[in-house]
Amino acid sequence: MTAPKKLFVKTYGCQMNVYDSERMAEALGGQGYVTTDRADDADMILLNTCHIREKAAEKVYSELGRFKGLKEEKPDLKIGVAGCVAQAEGAEIMRRQPLVDLVVGPQSYHRLPELEAKARSGEKALDTDFPEEDKFEKLKGKRKAQRGPTAFLTVQEGCDKFCAFCVVPYTRGAEVSRPADRILDEARDLVERGVREITLLGQNVNAYHGAGDGGDWSLARLIWALDKIDGLERIRFTTSHPNDMGDDLIAAHGECSKLMPYLHLPVQAGSDKILKRMNRSHTAESYLRLIERIRAARPDILMSGDFIVGFPEETEEDFQATMALIEEVNYGYAYSFKYSTRPGTPAAERAQVPEDEKDDRLQRLQALITRQQRACQDGMVGREVGVLFEKPGRFAGQMVGKSDYLHAVHVTAPDVAVGEIHRVRIVDSGANSLAGEVIAPV
Ligand code: 5AD
Ligand code: SF4
């Protein structure tokens, strides 16, 4: 038997890329590849890239340049670029960096076995199609590598919203939802292999409307069907758009005990003028009222968000409206970014905010968010939460996991095993995690 070939995958960007990287590794598993976490050990290097913010492509080129020495040492080494930069730049990548043997977009990576064979035979292999066939269906049955008690499961891809700053509708294409029965099959398969928590993924996950029994299913309906799978204990979903928070999904947050009390609901900005220019089709007020309804259904829900500062034409007053909105919502977690021009998007053409102004706003916003995150984490002390344990900690007898609210929690409990869920009393709040004591199995 020949020794297996080794595949090194480096993932940039969002959780959907994490999921895609896993599936790409599985697709190449059939070609005799096993994964390695060392680039210098690999027969194939695959960069799964992200195009959401500026310099993403530049980062990829500089990373590729670093493989030059490796390729000289090992002429058989194949180098591939996957993901959204691959989609956006296509063959340009091979022109600019001749080291690259293979380029594959996010919608065609089920064709990796053929592309790899082509690259192996010495040809350049490129595929950035949006094919008719369902890549997930083509990859069915290949998902055998799952370890650990948590998993991502992509249910929806692409976006029709066209926020004026965002490349996703161009790189990932139009919104497509996977059929419900295929998602449920994949979920059951994951649970059989030890998974206890599934995070449903989609660029616009709450716009999910997949074919199922009796017509289109909403995300809430899918969640209720997942709720019935024995052995699956926790359900999460991300990322949502405020305009797609249906009544049934809000109600599920109150009624479905497996649906965790955490919701990532980006608003981007707090000024209606900026929201309009961003093409967000909601206002600050409608977002705040929505959160009121969500909190009425699930009072302890931890809210998380995304913010962009320095969007074209954002004034100090507009920025203050974002700060006021953050004060009002009180986030448990947030991601914040300086606006970054993306070629081909409408906002790229508009008057830009100076870089030092963006820096200053980002710093002020992050200070506020950090205070809120800190207060939220510290506020957990004294409470009892569920914790799903994921791995041993740094010290003997220590186990670490995630609380219902997605905080990292560590306990000293030698009897606790990976994959178990326990009730834990939180006793301390550290820099990045909580300390707890196990009370009883859930
Ligand atoms: N500049 C800065 N941030 C952006 N995001 C998306 N596009 C841009 C951009 N051009 C942020 C948004 C989105 C998150 C995934 O990335 O906040 O919610
Ligand atoms: Fe991008 Fe807006 Fe779609 Fe989110 S909703 S993926 S920010 S276009």
Image: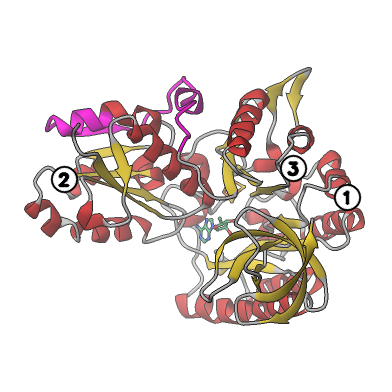
Q: Which residue is mark 1?
A: 254
Q: Horizontally, is 351 left or right of 35 in the view?
A: right
Q: Are marks 1 and 2 in contact (CB under 8 Å)?
A: no
What residue is pinned by disc 3? 244
- Residue 235 vs residue 11: left or right? right
In front of the other: 367 or 427: 427
The residue that disc 2 covers is 77
Label 2 vs label 3, nearer the camera: 2
Instruction: Say which quarter of the image contains residue 181.
Output: top right
Q: Report the Cα–Cα distance between label 2 and label 3.
A: 45 Å
Decide which of tag 2 and tag 3 comes sooner along the chain: 2
Q: Residues within 10 Å of mark 3 (few under 14, many from 20)?
A: some
Image x and y of residue 213, in percent? 75, 18
Q: CA distance from mark 3 to mark 1?
A: 17 Å
Instruction: Look at label 1 and name its amino acid.
Output: Gly
SS label for mark 1: helix
| In magenta stretch: residue 306 | no
The disc, 1 or 2, on the residue closer to the chain's N-terminal end is: 2
